[in-house]
């Protein structure tokens, strides 16, 4: 969404939009159509689906696009754009479409340079947290990147360091690579009202990698303790995110555990404006994830001035710097103790993080695109290197977040 908005704000000749047909080839999308789809989706994500008019409009536009692509509309128009412009770059910022190398190779043969955005290597480095078919699919994405990319954008230095050895396996020199941290783009919440009781939020799809199980066990222990200690209150836990895959243990706890019925609430996927409101009023964001490529919820919470307790994953440390409290994602007692400490009135632990937070700078999309523009200019003017052994890794420039 940030990329679409960024280039829709540029002059019409600066960027053309394409969509992919069911057969793989790409076709040009009219700029007005792209704008209408982006606006409808943005309204849906920000405001929700009540009333559902924006969602219905987005679906109608997408269905019309699919019909046009099925009929072949846009394919010739894209060839004309590639023939008319000598320095064209195909920018793909989603992992989708990367597993099919042939359509991308066809665009390159037609004269386009290729720059993908790699978000993470998790299906390859941590296959235990991925659905089985995603492992081979992600390996194909890396192979496409190694074979076709003229430049690469990554969201963190952690992702860059992880990507390097996988590219090396394909025996090709690393193309220009730019670390460009993602920006924070939550709508500003209204002035926060002091909540009547402390609550914590966890933002992310309910799947094993996000480690909701640790939080639910911690809350069950707190609830059991409260039953034997009159006067003890258990803070609330709000789970923001849809139910994902292979999460039977978490779902069983949510649906069957009597101790969790009162303090834990599964919110689901509210619109972005409500997400911002819920995070802004929270005691802290909890993020015990085992592995991340970037950790956008951490940046969003800190950007809203809310403390974060998270795992010590390299990408999360890169985003949060010295501000969050980092805990081992397997140390349940430590999480339970720190949650209780943050929930206490006048918590010194929370006050200490708020003091550190004063020195943290929110990553901006404008800074992200400054780095992207540098890479695109380099790619547009460079000669594609021939295949050769991969040299030793070089330091990667990381824009300062402090």
Image (tube, helix red, strand yellow):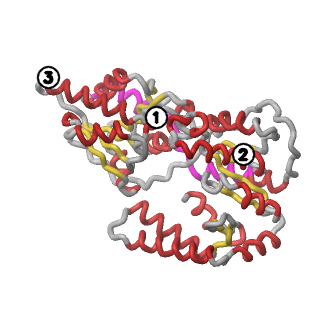
Decide which of tag 1 and tag 3 comes sooner along the chain.
3
Q: CA distance from mark 1 to mark 3?
A: 31 Å
**Along the line of sight, which residue is nearer the eye, 231 or 267?**
267
Which range is magenta?
346-375
**Along the line of sight, which residue is nearer the eye, 157 or 400?**
157
Q: In which image quadrant can residue 249 be found?
A: top left
Question: Which quadrant does the N terminus fall into?
Answer: bottom right
Q: Nearer the viewer, mark 1 or mark 3?
A: 1
Q: In which image quadrant can residue 398 be found?
A: top right
Decide which of tag 1 and tag 2 comes sooner along the chain.
2
- Residue 221 x/y as whole percent: 25, 26
Decide which of tag 2 and tag 3 comes sooner along the chain.
2
- Residue 85 x/y as whole percent: 81, 69
Asked if one can make out residue 197 in the rendered structure from this viewpoint, the answer is no
Q: Nearer the viewer, mark 1 or mark 2?
A: 2
Q: Main secondary structure of the magenta part?
A: helix
**Along the line of sight, which residue is nearer the eye, 223 or 199?**
223
């Amino acid at each position: 969404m940030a990329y679409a908005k960024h280039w829709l704000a540029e002059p019409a000749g600066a960027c053309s939009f394409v969509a992919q047909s069911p057969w793989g080839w790409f076709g040009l999308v009219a700029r007005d159509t792209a704008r209408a789809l982006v606006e409808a989706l943005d309204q849906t994500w920000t405001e929700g689906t009540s009333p559902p008019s924006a969602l219905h409009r987005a679906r109608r536009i997408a269905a019309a696009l699919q019909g046009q692509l099925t009929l072949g509309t846009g394919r010739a128009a894209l060839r004309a754009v590639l023939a008319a412009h000598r320095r064209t770059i195909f920018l793909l910022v989603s992992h989708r479409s990367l597993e099919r190398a042939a359509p991308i190779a066809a665009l390159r043969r037609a004269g386009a340079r290729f720059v993908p955005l790699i978000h993470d290597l998790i299906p390859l480095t941590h296959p235990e947290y991925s659905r089985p078919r995603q492992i081979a699919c992600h390996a194909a994405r890396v192979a496409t990147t190694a074979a076709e990319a003229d430049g690469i954008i990554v969201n963190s230095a952690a992702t860059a360091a992880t990507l390097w050895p996988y590219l090396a396996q394909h025996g090709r020199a690393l193309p220009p690579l730019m670390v460009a941290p993602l920006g924070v783009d939550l709508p500003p919440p209204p002035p926060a009202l002091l909540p009547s009781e402390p609550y914590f939020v966890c933002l992310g799809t309910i799947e094993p990698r996000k480690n909701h199980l640790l939080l639910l066990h911690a809350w069950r222990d707190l609830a059991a303790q409260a039953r034997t200690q009159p006067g003890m209150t258990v803070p609330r836990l709000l789970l923001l995110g849809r139910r994902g895959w292979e999460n039977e243990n978490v779902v069983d706890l949510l649906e069957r555990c009597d101790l969790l019925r009162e303090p834990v609430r599964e919110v689901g996927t509210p619109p972005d404006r409500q997400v911002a409101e819920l995070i802004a009023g929270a005691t802290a964001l909890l993020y015990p994830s085992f592995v991340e490529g970037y950790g956008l919820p951490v940046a969003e919470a800190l950007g809203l001035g809310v403390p974060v307790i998270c795992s010590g994953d390299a990408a999360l440390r890169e985003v949060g710097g010295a501000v969050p409290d980092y805990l081992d994602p397997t140390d349940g007692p430590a999480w339970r103790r720190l949650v209780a400490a943050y929930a206490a009135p006048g918590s010194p632990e929370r006050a200490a993080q708020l003091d550190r937070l004063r020195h943290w700078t929110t990553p901006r999309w404008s800074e992200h695109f400054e780095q992207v523009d540098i890479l695109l200019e380099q790619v547009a003017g460079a000669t594609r290197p021939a295949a050769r052994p991969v040299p030793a890794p070089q330091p990667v420039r990381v824009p300062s977040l402090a």
